[in-house]
Image (cartoon, helix red, strand yellow):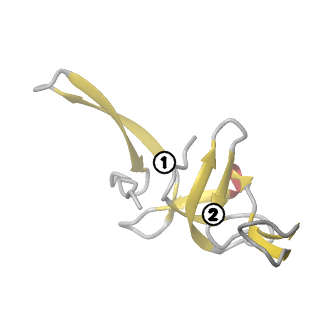
Amino acid sequence: MHIKKNDMVQIISGNDRGKQGRVLKVYPDQNKIIVEGINFIKRHTRPNQKLPQGGIVEREAPINASNAMVVCPKCNKLSKTGMKIIKDETKNRTSRIRYCKQCSEMLVTKAS
C-alpha cells in the first residue's frame, strides 16, 4: 500500500476532492484509509457510559486509498511514491525507503 499512517494526503476524487488531511488509520486488507476531516458521516448512537446523552455523532468514515495521493513535504505537490532498497554495509542489513518520484526526497512518516 502506498499510503502510511500520519502521511499528508490530498483527495483526488469524490465529494471531498481537493481537500488535504492527515491519515489517521490504514486498513491494508480492505485498501481503505481514514483521513482527518474528510468523509464525515452521521452516526445515530444510543446512550452509553461514554456518551450518556446519545444522539447523532459525526465522524470520519473510511475511503478507498486509490482516491488519495501523498503530498510530498519538500516540493508540496501530489506525488506517486516509489521504493528504494538501501543496503547498510556496516550492519549487513537492507531497508526499504519510500521516496517522492518527482523530487526524489525520502518520505518519512512522523510518529504522532
Q: Picture quarter containing residue 38? A: bottom right
Task: Name the one closer to the observer, 97 or 51.
Answer: 51
| Residue displayed at 73% across by 56% down | 62
Residue 88 placement (x, y as % from top left):
18, 29
**What is the count of numbered marks?**
2
Q: Residue at x 55, y 45 (%)?
A: 2
User: Which amino acid is tagged 2?
Assistant: Val
Q: Determine the image quadrant of residue 91.
A: top left
Picture layout, residue 65 above or below residue 58: above
Q: CA distance from mark 1 to mark 2?
A: 18 Å
Helix, strand or loop status at disc 1: strand
User: Please, which residue is most extreme toward the top here?
Assistant: 92
Identify residue type, mark 1.
Thr
Q: Position of residue 20 (x, y in %)?
A: 59, 72
Whole-percent x, y for residue 100 in the image? 42, 53
Horizontal side of 43 relative to 33 (left or right) equals right
Disc 2 crowd rating (10 Å Cα; few below 14, some 14-19, many 20+) is many
Secondary structure beneath disc 2? strand
User: What residue is shown with label 2?
Assistant: 35
Quadrant including the N terminus: top right
Residue 81 circle label: 1
Q: Residue drawn at (63%, 63%), measured in percent from left and top? A: 35
The vertical placement of 3 against 39, above or below, is above
* Residue 36: percent from left, percent from top: 61, 68
